[in-house]
Image: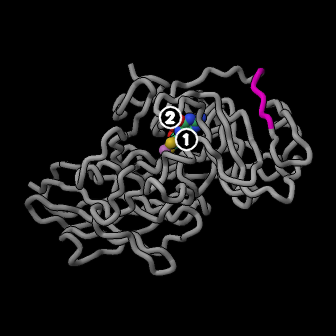
Amino acid sequence: MVPWGKRDDMITHTTEPYNAEPPPEALAGRTLTPVDTFFVRGHGPVPCLDPDAWRLSVGGLVEHPMTLSLDDLHTRFPRRDVVATLQCAGDRRAALLAVRPIPGETPWRSGAISTARWTGVSLADVLAHAVPRPDAVHVEFTAPDVSLEARPRQTYGGSIPLAKATAGEVLLAWTMNGRPLPPVHGGPVRVVVPGYIGARSVKWVTGVTVRDRPSDNYFQAVAYRMLPEGAPLGPVAPGSDILAPGERTVLPAGPVMVHGYAFGGGEQGVDRVEVSADGGLSWRRADLDPAYGRWAWRLWRAVLDLPAGEITIVARAWDIDGGCQPESAASVWNPGGYVNNSWPRVRVVVA
Ligand SMILES: Nc1nc2c(c(=O)[nH]1)N[C@H]1C(S)=C(S)[C@@H](COP(=O)(O)O)O[C@H]1N2
Ligand SMILES: [Mo]
């Protein structure tokens, strides 16, 4: 039995806590990822929260601390709807592991990224009622799930800059693709931070604390950094990936449709995507879907004429400022295995 109503072909990394990603082909060709296909990343067991008993406390450096019920969120604030892509900072770690081992971290392939339409209220509207004090700089989110990874043992949390929290797009969301947010994705209410690494979109959120510095939570202060003493990860790095054909697919010679996505993280627009069947000597420009809003990935497709043999298909995205993805996984390798935005490569066998 596949837990949480997920599709049968999910690639399960761990069952307790549940961590699973869809095969990349299942993500291809659809801007909105169906809920049964959406990846799950959890550091601890899924807490079972009663929506009627759920409360959100808003406090810290604010003039008017508040405790809000789900009904308060429904009735006291305008509803906001955002299509946002969530990408785990560990997405595509498997290609980094091939360079050098990264012990103890989940070997995500290409599926730790998915897109949904989220509905809720804007965190900016809630904070406007609470009125942050002049010394407010960061907003911390807390949740009740306890992770065994964290040292010392603690509940999950993280933070974002106040400027991001009040920009409008950050949601306290209770629906996902028009349905009540499932428990495994953070129901009854989660934070959705469009354009930031998935780790900041805290599920089962029960606390919003305004602070003068980032969260001291393990998942902000220790994990999710590129380097042990480096800055905590925030905005998503621009990148792209190939979703179909899948790795090791056997194909007949001739034209083949290649599918993928590009995502600039919201701050960085995608200008173009190119695909190569000869390791990057020659490139073909992919057709890029129109933007579905600033916070969603853009799907692309390209037809490549493949000769017989073992072929490596490569892709790369350019952003509107002329930046391009780094070529090699080795050049972006880091001890936690985060943010692999190097050129995606898929090997296929053309018979
Ligand atoms: N409370 C809580 N929130 C959490 C996590 C968690 O373990 N506990 N995992 C984070 C990480 S690392 C990611 S990538 C996203 C994954 O969201 P999803 O499971 O809905 O795909 O949730 C984030 N929010
Ligand atoms: Mo993550």
Quote the CA–CA distance across marks 1 and 2: 7 Å
Q: What amino acid is labelled 1 in the image? A: Tyr
- For mark 1, what is the residue? 218
Residue at position x 68%, y 35% in the image: 205
Decide whether residue 56 is among the magenta residues.
Answer: yes
- Tell me where residue 140 appears, x and y as whole percent: 69, 45
Residue at position x 26%, y 65% in the image: 314
Q: Nearer the viewer, residue 321 or 292?
A: 321
Report whether residue 83 is seen.
yes
* Mark 1 and mark 2 residues within 8 Å of each other at the beta carbon: yes
Instruction: Locate the C terminus by quadrant.
Output: bottom left
- Tell me where residue 2 appears, x and y as whole percent: 40, 23
> Please, what secondary structure does the residue beneath circle 2 have?
loop
With 333 as the anchor, is 293 left or right in this view?
right
Q: What amino acid is labelled 2 in the image? A: Arg
Q: Point out the residue furthest to the right here.
A: 64
Q: Does residue 286 sit above or below 135 in this rendering? A: below
The magenta span reads: 53-57
- For mark 2, what is the residue? 151
Residue at position x 53%, y 59% in the image: 231
